[in-house]
Image (cartoon, helix red, strand yellow):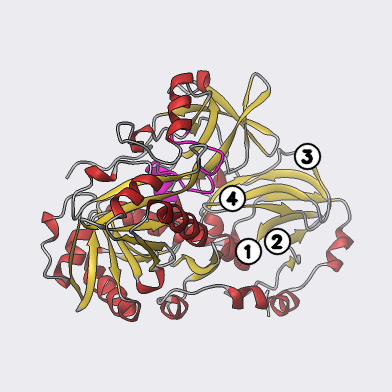
Amino acid sequence: MAYPADRRYSKDHEWIRLSEGVAEVGITDFAQQQLGDVVFVDLPAPGATVTAGTAFGTIESVKAVSELFAPMSGTILEVNTALKDHPEHVNSAPHDTWMVRVRVSDPAGAEGLLDAAQYEALLG
Amino acid sequence: MTDAVTALRTTPLHARHRASGARMTPFAGWDMPVEYSGITQEHMAVRTAAGVFDVSHMGQIEVAGKGALAAVQRISCNDASRLELGHAQYSGLLSPEGTFLDDLVVYRLGPSHFMLVVNAANVAADYAWIAEQAAAVGDVAVVDSSSRYALIAVQGPAALDTLQPLTGAHLSGVPYYGFTYGEVANARALISRTGYTGEDGFEVFVPPNTADKVWQALLQSGADQGVIACGLGARDTLRLEAGMRLHGQDIDATTTPLDAGLGWIVGWTKPSFIGAEALAAQKAAGTTRRLVGFELTDRGIARHGHAVVHNGAPVGLVTSGTQTPFLKKAVGMAYVPQQLSAAGTPLEIDIRGRITPGVVTPLPFYKRRAS
């Protein structure tokens, strides 16, 4: 699967798509492949603050639980409630399935993240 | 990383798993397939059609000679004298304290010849223990014959129709926990109607150099019915849904058959066995804790090691837990105090700090319909 060029990527395998100070955050195709069948996504409530590089939620596959790391700092505006009943969307369409929308506190922080080519290079 | 991978043992089907794109994982010292097409899909295939599993990592220990029955009676807690030729029996290998060194299936191959199928992680320790105990009985040979067998399981409602075309053995005549001999895809085989999934199915013991041929033949034979290759991930969710204990998690050297709700595998009436006195004492005194099934009633997934909480205090531990693909429920097994073990008792699980409500549920969670 190609990694879209319209967003940035973290070394923790999250993607973030920033538009006018608001970011959508999801996990990459590589991440969902590593996890296997996702059955549960635990996300913070709107209004919660998240800090770049720290865990803001958990994602569980049948076999394991992993933490979700915030690529950038900010405040949760919205969570993807569809994931409650359809966590499998993370597997079937990882790059079209955002988990949270975040009002980022410092949009310039995106510069520290990877672009698609750099992320693909990271995966090797 | 490279060194660790190099040190892992491999089954005769290892190259096939790699070539087929299975995701591999280290398990009990072996490099094993954890999933092929995905745990959910594999789990569902076993419940609705059938799945084929490589379980060649399991160990086989044979006990033979005039003293074989006496030796098996000593080391195995179930009553092997009630085991007829051609039948198998689930049992425990217990310490003198009555706790599980391992759980095992005992096959009676002949009047004085038994095969014990044990967990991969425990083969060396089990063999040493059994050989030592058998020597005390005398007139018996104990052999670790694990490398002589590849073990392939075909499990699910379509298992019989998948396996039957490959063998002249009359499979519908083999009862549950019975076995027969025959050829499977021209490989000489011991065909056992056993498994670890809660479904009808067979476990086929074949020479290692025939494993790939048998594996391919099974998948080809079942392809039209939706039979697929499965990994250890689905094996774990299937056995948990079926309420089957896993040694190292649900039972171990700190828990007895009575704690684990497995009193039925204890041969109470046989003369003696290792652990008998401890179990008799525990039975007389009553157990203080009990392995129970539970289901979460709120969102979340309990996992091995999470605390069971009652009135704000930790009272037990989750031993296994997952979101089961077929029932689509978060279930698990946990040790709880005896007074909290009745079905319907509310309990709570501490899932990484989130106190999640659940309820004690009878095992198994899933029981197949009688066919």
Relative to residue A24, is residue B216 depicted above or below?
below
Task: Report the magenta residues as a range.
Answer: B237-259
Q: Amino acid at mark 3?
A: Ala
Nearer-N-terminus badge (3/2): 2
Q: Of marks 3 and 4, which one's residue comes earlier in the chain? A: 3
Q: Quadrant of residue B305?
A: top right
CA separation, marks 1 and 4? Answer: 12 Å
Q: Residue at x 36, y 36 (%)?
A: B266
State whether residue B78 is above or below residue B268: below
User: Label 4 marks which chain's residue?
Assistant: A
- The answer for how far apart the CA atoms under marks 3 and 4 are is 21 Å
What residue do we see at 39% from left, 59% from top? B42
Say whether disc 2 or disc 4 marks the residue closer to the N-terminus: 2
Image disc number at residue B360: none
Q: Are the two marked residues, 1 and 2, in contact with CB atoms closer than 8 angstroms?
A: yes
- Res A31 label: 1
Q: In the picture, residue B40 is in which quadrant?
A: bottom left
Q: Is residue B179 left or right of residue B315?
A: left
Pointer 1 with pointer 4, Cβ within 8 A: no
Q: Is residue A3 visible?
A: yes
Q: Which residue is mark 4?
A: A60
- Distance from disc 1 to disc 2, alpha carbons, whole Å, reads 8 Å
Of B52 and B98, the residue lying toward us: B98
In whole angstroms, how far apart are the C-alphas of marks 2 and 4?
15 Å
Residue on which the image places disc 2: A14
Tell me which label, 1 or 2, sits earlier in the chain. 2
Q: Is residue B256 magenta?
A: yes
